[in-house]
Image (tube, rainbow, N blue to C red):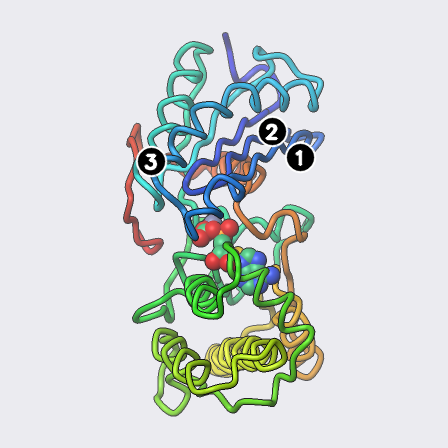
Amino acid sequence: MNAKSKPICVLGIETSCDETGIAIYHEEQGLIANQLHSQIDLHAIHGGVVPELASRDHIRKILPLTEQALVEANKAWEDLTHIAYTAGPGLVGALLVGASVGQSLAMSLGIPAIPVHHMEAHLLAPLLSESQPPFPFLGLLVSGGHTLLVKVDAIGSYKILGESCDDAVGEAFDKTAKLLGLVYPGGPAIAKLAEQGNPTAYDFPRPMMNRPGLDFSFSGLKTFVLNTYEDSDKSDQTKADIAASFQEAVVDTLAKKCLRAVKEYDYKALVIAGGVSANKSLREKLYDLGKVRGLEILFPEFRLCTDNGAMIAFTGYKKLENAIDPIGPIAVKARWPMSD
Ligand code: KG4
Ligand code: ZN
């Protein structure tokens, strides 16, 4: 089969954590399929992701979802020209499912497989609806495993300007939610409870704001919240006030660090991505910052904030479009710095 004679049509496979995401990106038609199976119900009773259960569930869902994606896109196996899969970072067993299926399908169809970095894919998700990406831009990546400020000059050109020294933002949301007895995943649960609370009820610390630089730290904030909660009357209103004040502290810290980076590097555009970019309070704060500073602000569509196959298929396509060589037939990497 000659992949070059037909339009590029990339199947994207995401299995790095607790979502099985399968999507198809076509060079002429754009995103033509986006199938997602969330494992939230499977892990919720355990209070967090159980890696072995995650791997087994990916195995169950990956092929049926791929077939559904082909039906949604109205394409046949032979129409696919490339298979992009998440190669890391993530849970190693879960990654191996997507990598083995991706590479096997590619081999049987006689087409190339493209290993994709999960955080690069998050970063590019907001560009899916942009014909002209606003290069150079500042990227704020906020997920369950990472908090990064990235200088983005072009597709494939990333420099880390700042990162969390301890917990990632999403992790801080998840752990704080657990302390307050909320369900997994904690980010949406805190955001929902915060709607009933007063964000100025507690003056929680804005970590590392009085130090120079663009790094973050969120583990101390979580401990501060725990102590506040333990010393409180633990009423429903108090819980809501704590959730709202915690969210406010996180959002304020992220916005202030973005502003610092924008000033230092004179950026004209800020692109926010990763699961926490679904947070409405963060969106409002950064849109306000954009208005004040004359800064273009880009968020992904809500359905593309958390893990999905669309961002993997799109990143695979962008690599091809920009003639960026895939890094060879790697299997998976549980840890994989984005600057590599
Ligand atoms: O990007 P993602 O789906 O997975 C990783 O790559 O880690 O991010 C998941 C994280 C979780 O920590 C989850 O609690 C958080 O994103 N999250 C949110 C919201 N929706 C998801 N955090 C705050 N507010 C939300 N609305
Ligand atoms: Zn993710």
Q: Which residue is drawn at the image coordinates 48% and 36% (left, top)?
A: 14
Q: Which residue is drawn at the image coordinates 59% and 31% (left, top)?
A: 23
Choose top left, top right, bottom left or bottom right for residue 175: bottom left
Relative to residue 14, is residue 148 depicted above or below? below
Pick whichever of labels 3 and 2 is earlier in the sequence: 2
Question: Percent x, y for residue 47?
Answer: 43, 52
> Which residue lies under the disc numbered 3?
52
Relative to residue 261, is residue 67 depicted above or below? above
Q: Is mark 1 within 8 Å of ligand 2?
A: no
Relative to residue 195, is residue 40 depicted above or below? above
CA separation in Å, label 1 and label 3: 31 Å
- Secondary structure beneath dot 3 equals helix
Q: Residues within 10 Å of mark 3 (few under 14, many from 20)?
A: few
Mark seen at residue 24 = 2
**Is there a contact, CB below 8 Å, between mark 3 and mark 2?**
no
Relative to residue 209, is residue 306 depicted above or below? above
**Is there a contact, CB below 8 Å, between mark 1 and mark 2?**
yes
Q: Which residue is drawn at the image coordinates 61% and 64% (left, top)?
A: 279
Q: Amino acid at mark 3?
A: Glu
Q: Residues within 10 Å of mark 1 (few under 14, many from 20)?
A: many
Q: Amino acid at mark 2?
A: Ile
Question: Percent x, y for residue 285?
Answer: 64, 77
Q: Amino acid at mark 1?
A: Leu
Question: Percent x, y for residue 225?
Answer: 44, 80
CA separation in Å, label 1 and label 2: 6 Å
Q: Nearer the viewer, mark 1 or mark 3?
A: 3
Residue 3 located left or right of residue 102: right
Q: Which residue is drawn at the image coordinates 58% and 25% (left, top)?
A: 8
Mark seen at residue 31 = 1
Choose top left, top right, bottom left or bottom right for residue 162: bottom left
Mark seen at residue 73 = none
Pick whichever of labels 1 and 3 is earlier in the sequence: 1
